[in-house]
Image (tube, coloured by chain):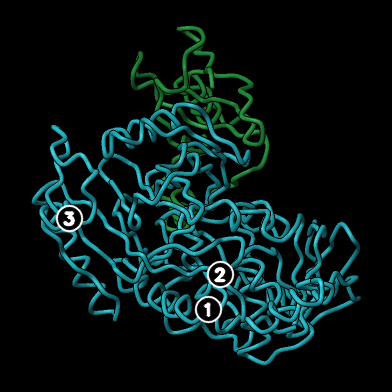
Amino acid sequence: MIIPHPLLGPRDAQEFTYLGDASLLNRPDWQAENADAAFYDYQYLRNNPAGVHRELWFHEQGDRSWLIVTRNTVTHEILGAELAVDVARDMSTKTETGV
Amino acid sequence: MRYSAFRILKEALSGHKGWTPAWRDPEPQASYDYVIVGGGGHGLATAHYLSKVFGKARIAVLEKGWIGGGNVGRNTTIVRSNYLLPGNEAFYELSMKLWEGLEQDLNYNAMVSQRGIMNLIHTDGQRDAYRRRGNSMILHGSDAELLTAKQVRKEAPFLNFDNARFPIKGALVHRRGGTVRHDAVAWGYARSADQHGVDIIQNCEVTGFRIENGAIKGVETSRGFIGATKVGVSVAGSSGKVMSYADMRLPIESHVLQAFVSEGLKPIIPGVITFGAGHFYVSQSDKGGLVFGGDIDGYNSYAQRGNLPVVEDVCEGGMALMPMIGRARLLRMWGGIMDMSMDGSPIIDKTSVDGLYFNGGWCYGGFKATPASGYVFAHLLAKDVPHETAAAMRFDRFEKGLVIDEKGVGAQPNLH
């Protein structure tokens, strides 16, 4: 598989290590009332789709950035890649502004 | 029809005209008491024990493809009872005992061959860990033996004992482990279940569940609705997909694992040899092919095929362990979809829906568990209480912090 790195261009997937579903970016609030249930959900449960999957890959043998790769789990076709830090920043801006 | 030497002789003298199909090909009935989703090894074993041991009737097994076409026909045929943790080992020892009596139970030659399995040791730390594991195995009624390097050399002289990174210092041997002809397991269970009145319905994909007031009423399939009082789901790599029809998210990711077979060679490898440090294991089939494999590819996949980097990694492991393997040609390789659970151990439990039961999370170790998995799942379906050897394999163990993590790597399925 070739991952289209947003900064470095096409890179072999072998340079990366795989973490899992991109939902791992949404770490629950540890002070919330239901934190134990939310962390159980976060830590253990997965959608595990047969089809399009957004997932975290770490460019360990490269620039050591985290990417969110969109990939089809049935065909292994890679549909896109973005920097996880950009996605996380968008998410926190939305949370702060209440959007 | 009962198989026997006398039967073969009789058929040989009468032109082999008396053989009948090993199982019927029935049309699905409108409803059943028990519907097993998934006609793999585990589903067929469940149907066999449910009908034969627990005396239940009106049972159907629904299979989306054909019997023996999934992981039961895609594994590397190894059976073993060499686990460490209390929640696991009693279960795998039950499985080993069932393997030992399987052929008589099924009246089917499954080529159960207890040729032994050898886990190689390369460091003092590893020897300590294997000694502990061996003691745990013996305490659970299994067998284990610690070998010195000299003893290993006697049994497998072709290994590279002086590898600079991983010199071989000994091994843990489990003599009752070995291999079983995997297709025969599927066929033997299917035939026996059929003889006990189970309807095996192939080319029948489950596409949804009918759930009313929190209780299961039946399954929607590609061949129409089939009513059911109890539904047991046993679909391995497709667990996430099938359970999503009941709006359930599981502590499971689906990953691809590859396996390999070389051309047929004269007998050279005495049993199963595992090289954990190099992510490689090998045995030799009765046809002579070297059957080997390594780690999962490491990313979510439903593709039933892997990628080349793991092929290279596995072959490097093979070359490091036994350099002579470089002279053999690779004949075939393939992939299967593993239901990798969050702690590397299976789940056999009720669900939040009344009458809906789940059996999955087998990771890459489902084949050896086939008889016990079927037995304890049938026990759960028939009696609504878990079998004593599977009492720890519950859904809520993650929430309660009671995980059964053999490797101790945490909730990271691609590391198990």
- Residue type at numbered disc 1: Leu
The furthest residue to the top:
A8
Q: Position of residue B24 (x, y in %)?
A: 83, 73
- Crowding at mark 3 (Cα within 10 Å: few <14, some 14-19, many 20+): few
Kindly tell me whether residue B399 is visible in this rendering.
no
Direction from residue B165 to residue B257 in the image, left or right: right
- Crowding at mark 2 (Cα within 10 Å: few <14, some 14-19, many 20+): many
**Disc number lying in front (2 or 1):** 2
Tell me the residue that label 1 is attached to.
B102
- Residue type at numbered disc 2: Ala
Quadrant, the N terminus of chain A: top right
- Residue type at numbered disc 3: Lys
Task: Give SS at disc 3.
Answer: helix
The furthest residue to the bottom:
B55
Disc 3 to disc 2, C-alpha distance: 30 Å
In front: A59, or B140?
Answer: B140
Colour seen for chain B: cyan
Direction from residue B291 to residue B6 in the image, left or right: right
Tell me the residue that label 3 is attached to.
B154
When the figure is inspected, residue B33 is found, relative to residue B186, above or below; the finding is below
Direction from residue B286 to residue B60 in the image, left or right: right
Pointer 2 with pointer 1, Cβ within 8 A = yes
Tell me the residue that label 2 is attached to.
B110
